[in-house]
Amino acid sequence: MFAPVLMLRRLCKSNRGVAYIEFAMALPILLMASLTGIEVANLVMSHLRVSNISMMTADNASRVRDSIDESDVVELFVGARTSGSSIGFTEHGRIILSSLETSDDGTKQWIRWQRCIGQKNVNSSDGRPMSKAGTAIIDGTEVLAENRTNQSAAPSHWEKQTITGMGPADRQIQAPGGSAVMVAEVVYDYQPVFFDNWLGDTEIKSIMAFNVRQRANQLIRNGGKIQPYSCNRFTQV
């Protein structure tokens, strides 16, 4: 019998490469399952981090006693920026902190002041502070003029605001009379680990609110002439 025929018969009976073939066939499936698991875990952690940032910002803002000023907001945003550093939050997200109150006549809700941080170009879904003349205030002059010392010529006022609260229509947040609610809206563009197009453009949102604890004066002050984190700025710091 010819040697090639013998070699062919031996090759047909050989099973020494079966394990390698099975591994090669299973590897893509195992790899895809592993990478998908990591991506899903990262997405879940990003949701949790965004939720924590909104809760921490609103809670800490509500705890400021006596009066609140721009330096308090700076401290709040430093903490939020540090908390979100692992997901690149301020590069891809935004915090909108609002002081929600009841109007003087008790008939409506209004935003007295608003501060923002983050490079994502997004505005509050519930509007902005407005002057008595009906002009939106986005430059941080709700109370103080541009020199950060004198009273603003057109401070924020409740008369021209038409909101009934903040948040989704079916579960709106409203401030109690004589006090305020600190509302933190946080928006973040999810940054995938492996699959840029698998999840599409995933925007994560979280809204948290806390009643002000002891603060009776809800004006935001600027004794140190600090540049406010006004909502026409889109910066990381």
Image (cartoon, rainbow, N blue to C red):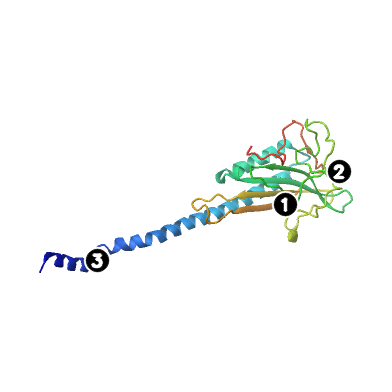
Secondary structure of the residue carrying tag 1 is loop
Q: Report how far apart the C-alphas of labels 3 and 1 lie in the structure.
A: 65 Å
Residue 226: where, in percent of width, then height? Answer: 72, 32
Discs 2, 3 touching: Cβ within 8 Å: no
Give the residue number, with chain letter if any, for mark 3: 15
**Which image quadrant for residue 32?**
bottom left
Q: Is residue 201 left or right of residue 129?
A: left
Discs 3, 1 touching: Cβ within 8 Å: no
Crowd tier of the residue under label 2, counting other residues whose Cα lies within 10 Å: few below 14, some 14–19, many 20 or above? few
Secondary structure of the residue carrying tag 3 is loop
**Which image quadrant for residue 95?**
top right
Residue 48: where, in percent of width, then height? Answer: 59, 53
Q: Amino acid at mark 2?
A: Ala
Residue at horizontal 72%, vertical 44%? 61
Secondary structure of the residue carrying tag 2 is loop
Give the residue number, with chain letter if any, for mark 1: 125
Q: Report how far apart the C-alphas of labels 2 and 3 lie in the structure.
A: 86 Å
Residue in the foreground of this view, choosing between 197 and 91: 197
Say if residue 86 shows up in the picture.
yes
Q: Amino acid at mark 1?
A: Ser
Crowd tier of the residue under label 3, counting other residues whose Cα lies within 10 Å: few below 14, some 14–19, many 20 or above? few
Give the residue number, with chain letter if any, for mark 2: 133
Residue in the foreground of this view, choosing between 210 and 110: 110
Residue at horizontal 60%, vertical 45%? 92
* Residue placed furthest toward the right: 105
Q: Is residue 166 left or right of residue 39?
A: right
Q: Amino acid at mark 3?
A: Asn
